Every structure is written in structure tokens, then in C-alpha cells.
Amino acid sequence: MSRDVASVGPDAPVSEIVDLMEKRAIKRLPVVSDGKVIGIVSRSNLLSALSHHVGEIPLSVVSDLEIRKRIMEEVENKAWMLDVAIDVVVHDGVVHLNGTVADENVRAAIRVAAENTSGAVRVVDNIRVVTPAADDT
């Protein structure tokens, strides 16, 4: 028996329970309310609950910065990217494409690259097609 017993309240967050179990190297924690033990939570309880939600937890969450990086890597070395001035801004997975291009096909290619990027939730295409002025020399 231990003199320095660890316990949690009935509203303790799971993260607190896990941290306490890890810190103390224990497998079970009493749940106490008003000085009385009202239950016990064990590692197996936590694993069982986690196993029921495994399909709901995303295996990887792609950061906005990573989404932007992937889009830029996809388009930056293409021959058609010459004379293209674009900016890619990503917020909460929503990709905002801004800037100008000289051809509608280039605009579409950039938009498709963004739409096909893993983690992109939606693409807002603000790219303008601007045809170069004819040289009058």
C-alpha cells in the first residue's frame, strides 16, 4: 500500500489522468468526489476508449505551412511558371491563390495543383488572367 495516494476528480481531463499515470508509473487511479471513492480508472479503460475512436482520429494533420510548401513545390519548377506572380496563403486548410498570370490554362493548372494537395480543404482562386500589352516598337 502507498501512503501518498494519487487520485483524480470525476471531471478530470483524460490528459491529466494519463500524465499522472505516467509520472507516477501507476496502472490505476481512484476517482474521488467529496472525499469518497466513486470509481477507478485504469490504463485498460483508457486503451479501450481509445480503440473505439481510432477511426475518428486523423492519422496526420497537415499544417497550413506544409500545404503551402507542397503547392509551391508542385508548381514552381514548371516551364509555364515563367512570368507568373502568385502568392499562396493557407488558413485552416483553406488555400487562397492570389496574383496574376498571362494565360487561363496556367491559372487552371495552379488551381488544380492546389485542389489536389493533401490537406487542402477548399481553394479560393483569386488569380487574375492579364494578357501582356503588345509591344508598339
Image: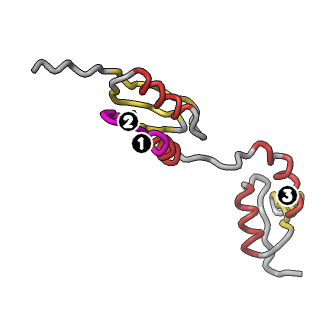
Please identify, in this view, whether the residue under mark 1 or under mark 3 is nearer the observer. Answer: 1
Kindly identify the residue that appears in the image at 86 percent across and 60 percent down: 41
Residue bearing mark 1: 76
Which portion, as a residue range, is magenta? Answer: 73-86
Estimate the spatial distance between the alpha carbons at disc 1 and disc 3, rounded to whole Å: 45 Å
- The three-letter code of the residue at mark 2 reads Met
Secondary element at image label 3: helix
Estimate the spatial distance between the alpha carbons at disc 1 and disc 2, rounded to whole Å: 6 Å
Give the side of residue 9 with respect to residue 125, left or right.
Answer: right
Estimate the spatial distance between the alpha carbons at disc 2 and disc 3, rounded to whole Å: 50 Å
Q: Residues within 10 Å of mark 2 (few under 14, many from 20)?
A: some
Kindly identify the residue that appears in the image at 73 percent across and 46 percent down: 57
Disc 1 + disc 2, Cβ < 8 Å: yes
Q: Residues within 10 Å of mark 3 (few under 14, many from 20)?
A: few
Q: Residues within 10 Å of mark 1 (few under 14, many from 20)?
A: few
Q: Position of residue 13 (x, y in %)?
A: 72, 54
- Is tag 2's residue or tag 3's residue first in the polypeptide sequence? 3
Residue bearing mark 3: 47
Kindly identify the residue that appears in the image at 85 percent across and 58 percent down: 47
Please identify, in this view, whether the residue under mark 2 or under mark 3 is nearer the observer. Answer: 2
Secondary element at image label 2: helix
Query: Which quadrant of the figure has residue 45?
Result: bottom right
- Is tag 1's residue or tag 3's residue first in the polypeptide sequence? 3
Kindly identify the residue that appears in the image at 57 percent across and 38 percent down: 117
